[in-house]
């Protein structure tokens, strides 16, 4: 009798998302295409980041530090993207390690963790860029030349 893992492996573990590009590199040095299971994990990571960045803001106006409602909303998004960036950084570092405990616990290959490291680092970079750009917009909108 086969286990559920053995039944799902030919559909989730082995096939590539883009043809046979999991075993050979993509054109223009883009790396290797993920398998279906890896792309599901990456999609889950991206969806969770978007949801956690977008929900449950506690807007309190009038605010002690900020004068307008627009600046208060921008400030909330700025702080949330900064926190999400800090949350993604340890994950990106953990996925990059050669001898991390997750390799032992999950029995995944190191190449899978390098792929997840790249995507966690990309999400970290997106959060940091959003944080910086929105912070600049917030300071311009509030009329301050610096955050201090």
Image: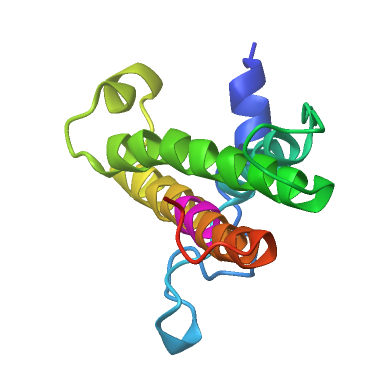
- Secondary structure mostly seen in magenta is helix
**Residue lying furthest left in this view?**
99
Tell me the residue at 22%/39% (across/down).
Answer: 97
Question: Hey, which quadrant is residue 138 in on the image?
Answer: bottom right
Tell me the residue at 63%/64% (across/down).
Answer: 143
Residue 11 vertical placement versus 107 (above, below):
below
Tell me the residue at 34%/34% (across/down).
Answer: 90
Q: Position of residue 134 (x, y in %)?
A: 61, 60
Any magenta on residue 95?
no
Q: Is residue 11 visible?
A: no
Q: Is residue 77 visible?
A: yes
Q: Is residue 16 left or right of residue 141?
A: left
Image quadrant holding the N terminus, namely top right
Question: Hey, which quadrant is residue 31 in on the image?
Answer: bottom left
Residue 142 vertical placement versus 9 (above, below):
below
- Looking at this view, is 28 or 83 the one in front? 83
- Looking at this view, is 137 or 145 the one in front? 145
Q: Position of residue 43 (x, y in %)?
A: 67, 46
What's the colour scheme? rainbow
Counting the numbered discs, the total is 0
Q: What span is in magenta?
A: 124-129
Q: Position of residue 78 (x, y in %)?
A: 60, 47
């Amino acid at each position: 009798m086969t286990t559920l893992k053995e039944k799902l492996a030919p559909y989730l573990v082995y096939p590539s998302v883009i043809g046979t590009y999991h075993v050979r590199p993509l054109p223009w040095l883009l790396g290797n295409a993920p398998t279906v299971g890896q792309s599901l994990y990456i999609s889950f990571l991206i969806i969770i980041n978007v949801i956690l960045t977008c929900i449950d803001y506690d807007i309190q106006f009038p605010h002690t530090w900020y004068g307008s409602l627009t600046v208060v909303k921008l400030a909330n998004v700025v702080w949330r993207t900064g926190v999400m960036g800090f949350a993604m950084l340890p994950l990106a570092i953990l996925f990059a390690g050669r001898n991390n405990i997750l390799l032992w616990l999950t029995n995944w290959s190191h190449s899978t963790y390098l792929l997840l490291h790249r995507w966690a680092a990309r999400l970290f970079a997106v959060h940091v860029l959003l944080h910086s750009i929105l912070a600049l917009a917030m300071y311009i909108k509030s009329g301050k030349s610096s955050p201090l």
